[in-house]
Image: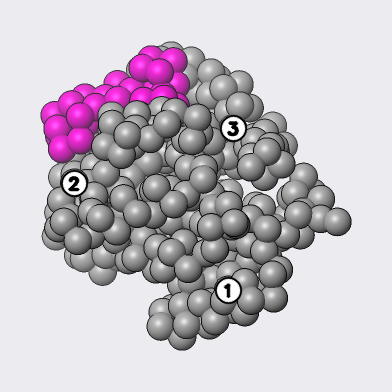
Amino acid sequence: MKKKICIIAPNINLKGGIATVIREYKQSHILKEFDLKYVSTYSNNRLIEFSKGLYHYMKMLVKKQIDLVHVHTASKGSFYRKSIFVNITPKNIPVILHIHGGGFIEFYDTAPIIIKKRVQKVIKRSDKIIVLSEKFKNELIDRFDIDNIKIVKVINGIKLNNEKIKLEDKKLQVIYLGKLTKNKGIYDLLQIIPKIHAKYPEVKFIIAGDGDIDKVKEIVISEEINNCTQVVGWIDGETKKKFLIESSILVMPSYFEAFGISIVEAMDYGMAVVATKVGGIPEIIQPNKNGLLFESGDLKEFSQALEKYISDNKARAKVQKNNLVAVEQYDINNVINQIKEIYLTI
C-alpha cells in the first residue's frame, strides 16, 4: 500500500516560489510511489481557499487518509495559516515543516512573545524541518535548540534546460527577476541604472516581476531611463525563456532571500550573477567563479560589481561558462530524490 502523504501549500496556480516547487512535485515520476494529496491554503480568494483547505484536511484526518504531512510555509500570514494545520494534526502523524522565504528569522526575532510561542510550538511539534541553506539551518538551531538530526538542508532545484546555450548570441542585457518590492532591492537597481546607462549606453535592462509595477514604471520615466529599461511585469513560459536566453547578467539585490531560485535559472541559461550576500545566496555564488556578491543596500558596491561584468567581456564569459556546468547540481530530480528519501525514512 502506498504511503499517504498530505502536502499543505498555496494554490499551485499562483505565482511564486512555493507554488513552483509544488508543481514540480506533482509532475515528478520520482514521487509516484506515494499517494500524494494536496491541500491548498491560499489563493486570490484567501478566506474561501483557507476555509475549504482546512475543511478538506480535517475530513481526511477523520477518515484516516493521512500517514505523513508535508507543510510548506514562509513567514507572517503564510506561517499563521500553516500553524493551524500543524496544531490540529494528531501526534501519531509525522509532520515535515518545509520553510521557504528569506524573512523567517526576522519575522521571529521581531515578533511579540505570543507569536514567538506559537512559532516555538510549531517547531517543537515538527518531526523534520527542511531548510534551503546551511546558514538558515544554523540560525534555527541557535534560536530553537533543535537537534541537528531533526533539521535538513534541501536546496531548491529546477528542470534543467536541455537546449545548447550560445553565449556569443547573447545581448549585453541585464535582467531582474523577482517581486518588485523594496525588500527585493528593485529600488536600489533603479537608483544605479542612470549612472550605468551614462557610462555604457549600449546596455539594456529588463525588469520582470509583479508587485509595484506602476511605481517602477513611473520611476523609469521620471529618471529618463525608459530608452534602456523595459518593465515587462510577471513573465513565464516562452516569454521568460526568451529573456533568459538573450540576457547576459542577472541581478538580485535582495535584502532577504532564503535561496534565490532565479539565480539557478540564470546559471542554467549561461548568465553571470550579481547578487547580495543574504540568506543562502553565498552558498550558490562563489565570487569570481559564479558571479559577484555585495552588501545589500550598498549602491556603490552594487554598481561596481555590475559594471565589472558589463565592461569586462572576458571575466563575464568565464563566469557564464562556469555556470552552465555548475547548474547541474540543481537538477530538480536530485532534489526530489532527497524529498523521497525523507518520506521513506520518517
Does the CB distance between marks 2 and 1 fall below 8 Å? no
Magenta residues span 282-309
Label 1: which residue? 57
The nearer-to-camera label among 2 and 1 is: 1
Q: Is residue 321 visible?
A: yes
Q: Marks 3 and 1, Cα distance to the nearest angstrom?
A: 32 Å
Q: Which image quarter is the N terminus in?
A: bottom right
Q: Which image quarter is the C terminus in?
A: top right
Measuring 57% from the left and 22% from the top, which residue is drawn there? 326
Position of residue 284 measured from the top left corner of the image (x, y, whole percent): 44, 27
Position of residue 334 measured from the top left corner of the image (x, y, whole percent): 67, 33
Ranked by sequence position, the earlier of labels 2 and 1 is: 1
Indicate the secondary structure of the residue bearing disc 2.
helix
Q: Classify 307 as above or below 335.
A: above
Ranked by sequence position, the earlier of labels 3 and 1 is: 1
Label 3: which residue? 330
Mark 2: few/some/many CA within 10 Å (<14, 14-19, 20+)? few
Measuring 39% from the left and 47% from the top, which residue is drawn there? 124
In the image, 233 versus 220, the foreground residue is 233
Indicate the secondary structure of the residue bearing disc 3.
helix
